[in-house]
Image (tube, rainbow, N blue to C red):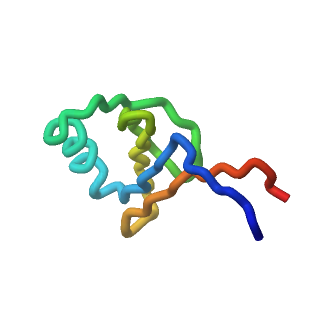
Amino acid sequence: MNQQFTPGINIAIKIPKNKYEKTVDFYKNILKFKVTEKPIDNPTVSRTHQVKFGDTILWLDCVDNYTHSETWLQLTVPDLN
C-alpha cells in the first residue's frame, strides 16, 4: 500500500461524563482558549464543545458510557480504493 494519508482539521477527544466539566474548564479557564458549546444530535455524544486550536478544531465530546478518554484523529486520503 502506497497511500498518502494527511491530517484533517478535526481532532476529537472523547471524555467520560464524570470528567467532562473539569476538562472544559481546563481548556477555557486555565489555557484561556476560546471554547464554544455546539448543539449536537448524536446517540453516543451528549454534549460537545469546539476549541479553536490554530488551524485545527479540537472537539471535546462528552460520552456517557466511556470509562476513559480517547483521542480520535481525522485522516484524509486522495483515493480510498
Quarter of the rendering occupied by the N terminus: bottom right
Is 67 located above or below residue 60 in the figure? below
Q: Residue furthest left?
A: 30
Which quadrant is the C terminus positioned in?
bottom right
- Viewer-nearest residue: 9 or 13: 9
For this view, does 19 lie left or right of residue 9?
left
Residue 55, position as x, y percentages in the image: 44, 34
Q: Quadrant of residue 48?
A: top left
In depth, the one of 76 and 58 nearer the eye is 76
Closer to the camera, 59 or 4?
4
Residue at point 41%, 42% (across, down): 58
Q: Residue at x 43, y 65 (%)?
A: 66
Across and down, in percent, residue 21 comes to: 26, 46
- In the rendered image, the residue lying farthest to the right is 81
Along the line of sight, which residue is nearer the eye, 81 or 71?
Answer: 81
* Residue drawn at x 44%, y 38% as measured from the top left: 57
Q: Looking at the picture, how far across and down is residue 19, in whole percent?
A: 27, 56
How far from the left and from the top, in percent, is residue 68? 37, 68
> Is 52 drawn above or below residue 63 in the view shown?
above
Counting the numbered discs, the total is: 0
Horizontal side of residue 35 vs 6, given as left or right: left
Q: Is residue 62 above or below residue 34?
A: below
Question: Which residue is found at the position 71% from the left and 51% from the top?
Answer: 77
